[in-house]
Amino acid sequence: MKRFVALLVSSFALMAAPVVAETVAITGGKVVVGDGSAPIDGATVVIRDGLVVAAGTDVAIPANARQIDASGKWVTPGIFAGFSRIGLIEVNAVTATNDTNAADSVFSAALDVQYAVNPFAAPVAVNRAAGVTRAVVSPSTGKSIFGGYGAIVDLGQDSDPITKARAFQFVELGETGHRRAGGSRAASHILFRAMLEEARTYSRNPSLFDSDLMKASDAKALLPVINGSTRLLVHVESANDILKVLDLSKDFPSLKLVLVGVNEGWRVANAIAAAKVPVLASALSDLPYSFEDLAATQSNIGRMKRAGVEVAIGMINDRDAHQLRYSMQYAGNLVALNKVPRATGLSWDEAFAAISSKPAEIMGMGAQLGSLKAGRKGDVVIWTGDPLELSTQVESVFIDGVEQSLSNRQERLRERYRNPAPGALPKAYDR
């Protein structure tokens, strides 16, 4: 326990160090803008005042810029994790460090993860060092089908991780949803409709609101969902559940739906595309973990993309609090999938966009995040090679134009035990 506390103290010290956005010119690298276009050889990226000024060839370098030679390297936007619980769990087995849901709370939709995201959690630094700079952070559900508000966060080494609070509301409407609602999908859908109707009742006269179904705070929290000003992320996996969710738009036409998980999405891809509902999909599920994803296939994302679905990679219930760095591996595997007979993957450019610009666009943040287009936040990563290859390493990470420390708990443990010598081991984390 003392060693763990010492580690936290060292992490706090790192985050307390002053950080300043510079004017930086990264020159000579293979630049990936991240918008689905092809990489540009021998290009330059300029960051100033925390924003990308330009990316490409024939870019003027400001006289006061710190120049970084990236010849022989790749330069990309930071990885944008499309779905996660980063910063909400420190240790899975320790309940006190798990803030993903409030199973014993009387509240549901009113819960807000911005108050629980911990920028000092060890997984934040680990994933930052791997090139992940932004993430969608969602609650899970407790007693209700609604989990509450999620946020967009950055993984910077400071104490203010929230990029956008109350960015969306999260709801379960698959197998987990039917358990939360009382044991059937019929119950989960009637509960969903009833809660939205109660929110409408609240909007008419808040002072007289009295409901056995939900607290006034929960009803108030659902008002932005009803009027379409806040996205509703819906976790569903089976083709049948997906179709039923799409039908909800008939009763609630203002809902701004985003589907999450969607392992059987390929079976109803045309319907998803026709409804113009975007998807944050699990990347490589090909085994039936439950009855709701018996038709899971690694070709799921590729087939949905070919059908015209706007799709990005998310990691719901897939080590989503700790291993966002797997996003690059998943994207690379989708590229390799094209070499498997009868399989459907993504092109390299599509795959990288699925972990950069696409999740940003789906979450309504494409004008600010996810690419190296002018005016976007200065989230930039320099890699030793192709970022979708497992052997590639991260050399530098910038978030909001500030170069970040790559130090993290795993790295310090590696260095401590790299060359153990006879005798007493050194004090743990003595810096």
Image: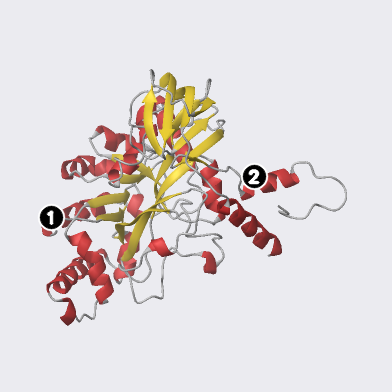
> Is 185 located above or below residue 264 in the figure?
below
Element type at marker 1?
loop
Against 57, residue 191 (above or below) is: below
* 189 vs 22: above or below: below
- Amino acid type for the residue under numbered disc 1: Pro
Residue 54 visible in the picture: yes
| Numbered mark located on residue 253 in the image | 1
Gap between marks 1 and 2, in whole Å?
49 Å
Give the x, y percent position of residue 335.
41, 29
| Dot 2 amino acid type | Glu
Percent of width and height locating residue 35 = 33, 31
Mark 1 or 2, closer to the camera: 2
The extreme front residue here reads 63
Whichever of labels 1 and 2 marks the residue nearer the N terminus, that label is 1
Q: Is residue 305 left or right of residue 86?
A: left
Disc 2: which residue: 411
Residue at the spot 29% in from the left edge and 54% down from the top edge: 233
Q: Residue at x 53, y 20 (%)?
A: 72
Q: Is residue 384 left or right of residue 187?
A: right
